[in-house]
Image: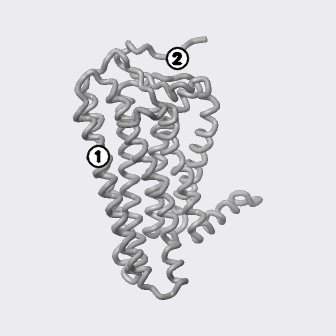
Amino acid sequence: MASFNLTPSDSSTFTLTGIPGLEAAHIWISIPFTMFYIIGLLGNFTLLFVVSKEQTLHKPMYLLLCLLAVTEIGTSTSIMPKALCIFWFQLKGITVGGCLTQMFFLHAGTVMHSAVLVTMAFDRYVAICNPLRYTTILTNARIAKLGLVGLIRAVLCILPLPLLLSRQPFCANRIIPHAYCDHMAVAKLSCGDITVNRMYGLVIAFVVNGSDLTLIALSYSLIIRAVLRISSKKAHQKALNTCTAHICVMLMSYPSFFFSTLTHRFGQGIAPHIHIILANLYFLLPTMFNPIIYGVKNKQLREKVGKYTCRMYSPGGH
């Protein structure tokens, strides 16, 4: 049987191992990964389709959901097709250019995802603390501008990562013990000094996400203060209910991001296969669950999705 494994001496390529130590179980591991990926794509594309078709959903909150969906489709798609090629066909080779491109889209998508979550927190703050001015403060045009600012920030922050690595000399060992080209996994293969790469990656991870988390915490502290001033218990519940979905999405995103970032640098005691499985799930689970969370929590969106689903499956439906 022909081997697709590339030899480490091939100077134009890297070799991704998939999940080290679990190569024999790659096919079995690929089954849940494929399911999560397909469900995530279906959920996010359904959300994009329904919002684009329904004029009543052309509002800031739903545009933010679309931004989140596009970001999650992008980040999961930047890693999963290649990972599945490794799991199914042992196609482990990836060119240096392909590796650096994957790294850029992957990490830029993560920074963009964080920017969308900050904008969503601001949206909830205005909706609860300043409802009468909501439509004038948060217009569709303003959401589009905030999305563009988030995209520019992601590109400017992440572009130096592949550029710095492209200048590094790489050793004879070009095997990346990972299923995708994570920045630190690739940097560790260099024969040169990677102090700048290591520090820049850590600073970006903590400054960008740290500042985003600070802004989110500020939004929620103002929301809680406003809610506590309301005397009606029913109004309390209604106000907090509007934030539940956003809080769930954040709880899935940020802890796993910091875990993945820290274990790559300081987690020598953690088994590589555990770290890599969790790193893959970090991109797959939010992509799968976020459309479900928002679909369950948002009555208007749920009804519109139901309407299109019924049309699709009804006899003669278009």
Q: Residue at x 56, y 49 (%)?
A: 40
Marks 1 and 2, the one that precedes in the sequence:
2
Mark sitting on residue 4: 2
* Alpha carbon separation for disc pair 1 and 2: 36 Å
Q: Nearer the viewer, mark 1 or mark 2?
A: 1
Q: Mark 1 touching mark 2, by CB under 8 A?
A: no
Circle 1: residue type? Ile
Q: Secondary structure at mark 2?
A: loop
Quarter of the picture holding the C terminus = bottom right
Q: In this view of the protein, can residue 267 be seen by the observer?
A: yes
Relative horizontal placement of residue 273, taking residue 10 as reference (left or right): right
Q: In this view of the protein, can residue 102 be seen by the observer?
A: no
Q: Secondary structure at mark 1?
A: helix
- The residue that label 1 is drawn on is 204
Residue extending furthest toward the right: 315
Mark sitting on residue 314: none
How dense is the environment of label 2, judged by Cα within 10 Å: few (below 14), some, or many (20 and up)? few
Q: Position of residue 240 (x, y in %)?
A: 49, 74
Circle 2: residue type? Phe
Residue extending furthest toward the front: 269
Give the image quarter of residue 164. top left
Give the image quarter of residue 216. bottom left
